Every structure is written in C-alpha cells, then in structure tokens.
Image (cartoon, coloured by chain):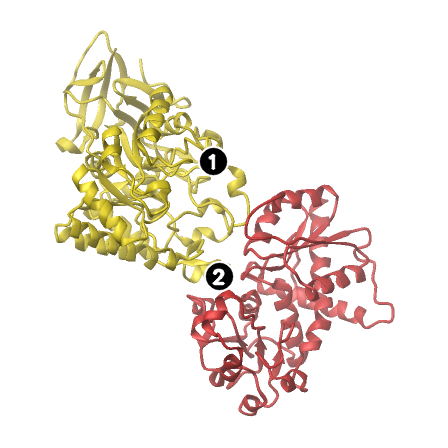
Chain colours: A red, B yellow
Amino acid sequence: MAEVRWNKKDLLGLEYLSKEEIELILETADSFKEVTTREIKKVPALRGKTVVNLFYEPSTRTRVSFELAAKRLSADVINIATETSSVRKGETLIDTGRNIEALKADIIVVRHNCSGAPVMLAKHVSISVVNAGDGWHEHPTQALLDMFTLKERLGRIAGINVTIVGDIAHSRVARSNIWGLTKLGANVTVCAPPMLIPAGIEQMNVQVTTDIEEALGNADAVNVLRMQFERDVQSAFPQQIEYFKKYGITEERLKRAKKDLIIMHPGPINRGIEIASEVADCSQSVILDQVTNGIAVRMAVLFLVSQARDENQI
Amino acid sequence: MKILIKNGRLIDPANKIDQVLDILVDNTKIVRLDKNITNGQATVIDATNKIVMPALVDMHVHLRQPGREDKETIFSGTQAAVHGGVGTVLAMPNTEPPIDSPEQIRLLKKIISQTANAKVLIAATITVGRQGKELTPIAQLKKEGAVAITDDGSSVDSAEILAKAMVKARQAKILIISHCEDKTLSQNGVMNLGAMSTRLGLRGIPNASEYKRVQRDIELAAKTKCRLHIAHVSCQESVEIIAKAKKKGIMVTAETAPHYFSLTEKALFDYDTNKKMNPPLRTDKDVAAIKDALSDGTIDAIASDHAPHTMPDKDIEFDHAEFGVIGLETELAVSITNLVETKHLSWLDLAKVMSLNPARILGIDRGNLSVGKSADLIVVDPVKTWQVRKEEFLSKSKNSCFLGMQLKGKVLYTILGGKIVYKVKDSEDISH
C-alpha cells in the first residue's frame, strides 16, 4: 500500500488529487475487485451508511455502477433522478443538498449537466460529495476505472502512450483522463477534428493532433470517446459517416498501429460511428473489462471518502 | 456650516496641485485653499498624513430601481457610493422597466430627489425597451435630464440603428455609451475563452466578441462625428483599437472596471460565481494592457460597473448565475492597491481617472477642487489596510469579487456639497 492517507471528504475531480492519492484509490480498488469475484459479493464496509445518487442528467450505466458499488459495501442506496432544463425553477442544488444532508445521508453521488456543480455542492454540505460527471468538466471515476484497466493490462501507467480520440471539447471523460494519466506519468495525445479541440488544451501537458494515423502511431492504448451529434458537434460534422471515415477506429487503421494496442471506450458505444463494430468486439478491446472494473473503483471511492469523513468527525 | 480640513495632502488634477494645504468649506462651496487657515467657527478635520481629493465620479452603476429593489435601491446604492468615496454616479437604464421615455426619467428623478444620498445622474436607453429595434426620443430624453444614452447590458446589434442614434445624439449633444459585445461570438459563454475555460469545462467568450464591436462602434462614431464612450474595456485588443482611434482624432473615450486590472480568469478556479461578470475576467496580458492604458491615457476612466445581485441569483450553478459584481465600496481601495501602490498611477493620475475625467466626459462640473466649486471631496487614509468583508457593505447585495482580499486605502470622510455624508466609524476619530 502507498504511504499516503486519504483525508478528503469529497471526490470532485482528478485535478484536485495528488499522484499518491490516485494510486491509493487504484490500490484500494484492487482489493475490492477480489470481492466482486466472490460468490457472495458483499462486504460490510459501509453498513449503516446511506448513499444518495442524485442525477440531474439521464445515465444508466454510471448510476447502476455506483448503486452496485454501494450495495456491495452494504450501504443503503436511494436514487433521485431529476430532469433540469436550462431555466432555473424549483429547489436549488444547494437546498436539495442540504435536505439530503438533513435526511442524514452520508454520501451524495451527483451527476449534473453544469460544470462545477459538484464543487459548489461540496462547499455547502458537510457530507461527502462524489462527482459522477459534471458538464464538460470531469468524470473522475470513469478516468479512474480507465486507469485501473490500463494498469491491469500493462502493469503500469508511467511511460505508456495513451491517445484519446473524439469530441475533446465537450468531454469530461477526456479531461479527467488527462489529469489522471499525466499525473501518473503517461504520455497523452488528444486527437480530434479542429473544431472539437478546445482552446489551450496543450497547456494540460498533452500532445494535440488532428491526424488519426499520427495519433495511433505509437499508442499503447486508445480511448475512443462516444460521439454525440448534438448542437455543437453538428456544425463540425454534419455527417456521421464522414466522421467515421476520418476518425473512426477501424480494422484498417489498427493494422497500422501497434499490434497489441488496447482499445477502450467509456460507453455506450455507437457502432459504426466512432468505432467499427468488429473493433469493439475484438480481442484488443477492453470495453467490458472497464465496466466490470468500474464497480471496484467506485467501491474504493465510496469507501475512502466515507472513512475520511468518519475519521475527521472524531 | 463651515468645515476646515487641515494639513491634508491635497490632490487636485484640474489645477495640477499635489501639496499639503488647508481647505475651507463654507455652506456648499470651497471658499479658501491655503497654508495655515484658521477659523473659529468651522468644524475641523485633521487630515495630517491623509489624502484630500475630489469625490469620485463613477460613470457606470446599476442601482436597479425601479424594478429590482430586492437587489439595490437608489437609497442603498448611494449609501454604498458615499461609503466608497463616490459622490456622483451615472445610473444605468437597464432597470425594469428600462429608462426609455421622458415619463420614466420623471419618475426616476422623483425617487432620486426623495432618497439619494449622493448625486445620481441619469442614463437613458438608446432603443425602446433595450430591444435594439426602435430609437427612443433622444432629444426629449436629453431635455428631461438624461446625460447619456446606452443599451448597457446589450450591444445595439444593428449598425444602421446605432448610426442613426449617433446622428441624433450628436444633434442633441448627448453622450453615447457602448456596451461592446457581439453575441454571435460570445454565444452562451460564461467566462473568458482559453486554457482556463477548457480546464473548467465552461463555455468561453472570446476577446473578439468585445473588440470587434469596439472597432465597429468607433468606425460608426467617426463617420457620424458623434462622441462615443466605450464601457468596461477588458482586453488588450480593445485597448489597441481605442489608442489608434484617439491618434486619428476620433472623439472616443473609454472606461475600465477595477476587476479588469486586478484579477484574471485564474480566479475562477473554484467556480466562484462572484467572479462571473460580462465582459469576463481575462488573462495576464490583458491586465497588463489595461494598466498601461490607464497610465498612458488610452483609457480615460475607472468605473465600477456596480452590478448588485441577490444570493439566489448567485448561489447557483455557474452556468445559471447572473453576470455582475458590486464595486462602489471597493473601487478606490482596489485602485490604490493595484495602481498607485504599484506605481502605475500617481495620486494625481488616480484622481484624474476616478473623478476629473469621468466628470468631463459626462459634462458636469465635478472632480475639481478650485475655490468656488461645489465642495465634493473625500479624505482618505492612504496606508490603512483592511479586509473586504460582506458584513461591511452598505449595498443591499454582497456579490463582490474582492471578498476576503486585503486592500490599502480607506475613505474616512465623504463630503458632498459641503455636507459630511459619510464618516468612518471604526478608526480613531480625527475631527475635533
């Protein structure tokens, strides 16, 4: 185990963590992964604790993964799904948070369409806040499970070459991966059409390219982002097929990459848009391992923040 | 009533005076400036080691009345003004309803005469309802008392309509103030576009959304020979465009706000909505350009862009929070701390950009300490440091971007028209 103690009540983003803290989460997740392979997949670590999943954005896989993680730690779980529109009405996020706190819950897992919402929430409640994805900002547990999977496959993070392909501008998965991977010493390349590369991204210590062949050239792993053809992307790529032609991860492109290139995707995948169907299912793909590992990583996060809060209260 | 201010360092840029002098005020006016004045009847203020300068003239203030009295009123806003050493404010017309007709001006004048603690000048809108479509009756607005017209909060998007307004403004001899923002470029941005907006995952506002409009509005002003004032300059490119225009002799003036020379986009690291304003906080190079522009006269004035908002409008998701920060009660100290202390401006320069220049731009007889002038002046402790705290604001709203900061320079007295309208409470009483 690393010589570091976890003393944060919240997990808001990988930007806010040290290398050692990230490693501690991954090591803790390693021991929880063993639990998930047992016949009885449950430990009493969070017995008597309440986890509230507060989701302002539709999400199935992240919510289910957090719910399973909490249940395997023997916590009680409540799910609150709220649709918000761009206009403000009804109860504010801070008021909702304070109400959940008054209900004596211990951890709020929050997904929000506004960047920074979990940061604000955490400032106003004394219970733990875990960011399950906020706007274009961060999705820390996704990046942690991506790194966990990479470490499982390659044995290390330091020195490996990871390429992230897709809509970097609007991706919280990309940002969290960049923070986490660079802190642990990986070389990160981002690849996207020019309009989907955000201003000043190179200041986050990444290589930037618009050329997919170059991006895959010496990559040990490629993280393929889900393409969502909404407002902002529409003008950049009116035709989904055109995106696939220029940036899609195809068998043809894999032939020119390292032969054991690891293929990752945060899901849900769009077959034939950002990734060819055969590639998604090939032996280099770890997409389903990521899903499995997500539970162990989220167990580790819930465990660590809960423990830190218990200790801080003494 | 007579007031004698003794031994203060008198700063009067209108007469290029920076020396220790006594100043005698009788009734509403300054009656004598000299060494060693004595007067048995006067209330004496000992201003030894203190600065005596013209009260500030803040040409960009949102007082929110009528319509949003929950955020600010003429009464509370002018209380805040005198607390900050501001004697005259120009009230922006984006109230609810907006000040776009002679009737609205008449109503506003009535509230001002009944409740204001400082001099309140009125700006009216350029277009009806600030909709950018139909011009207001500009000559009538002027006749009713408006000293400027502006659709502040929005740009007039149509160049044709703005050009027409400029022609009418020239004829009516009224100042046009431009809020420069091309919404097709700022889109739904909430902060400066750049590395920081990328890091935070927030929509960015490029410098171009400001400076392209600065460029357009200056060209229109040159063509129509209309005097133009550019509000809240925030970026380097705007400064360059204004400098060029001035060199060509175009009648343009400009203001900036204290936050644009004091803070950068980095202040948004924790999504503090009290640092959300429009235009947004920019970068180090923009801050440097704004400071230089104040030193070399490219930017004529400092104005607070005091924009009060209630807690429910600010304590929400960054995307949804209102734009704007309060500034009346901090602008002097922020300017002393970040411009005078750093030698970007002398005290004379400071009095010029915070009082004399805005008074001249607005065409009012203020910012000047000559004998015979209205006694609008402040006594400032130039070395007193203090921390910005919510509890000390007299504004109804507390949304300051300087909360928690240590500032240098504190207003001890604000005297308007010969009357002490504000006197510091906490420090030692220096009057006899």
In which quadrant is the N terminus of chain A drawn?
Answer: bottom right
**Residue B354 against residue B164 in the figure, above or below:** above
Q: Secondary structure at mark 1?
A: loop
**Residue A266 against residue B402 in the figure, above or below:** below
Disc 1 residue type (three-letter): Lys
The image's mark for residue A66 is none
Q: Are marks 2 and 1 on the same chain?
A: yes
Between B51 and B68, the one nearer to me in the picture: B68
What is the x, y in percent for residue A38? 84, 71
Marks 2 and 1, Cα distance to the nearest angstrom?
A: 28 Å
Q: Is residue B203 left or right of residue A307?
A: left
**Residue B89 against residue A105 in the figure, above or below:** above
Q: Quadrant of residue A274?
A: bottom right
Q: Residue at x 82, y 51 (%)?
A: A48
Q: For mark 1, name the chain.
A: B
Disc 2 residue type (three-letter): Arg
Q: Residue at x 36, y 47 (%)?
A: B154
What is the x, y in percent for residue A275? 59, 81
What is the x, y in percent for residue A208? 45, 75
The image's mark for residue B199 is 2
Q: For mark 2, name the chain.
A: B
What is the x, y in percent for residue B229? 24, 44
**Residue A213 against residue B258 in the figure, above or below:** below
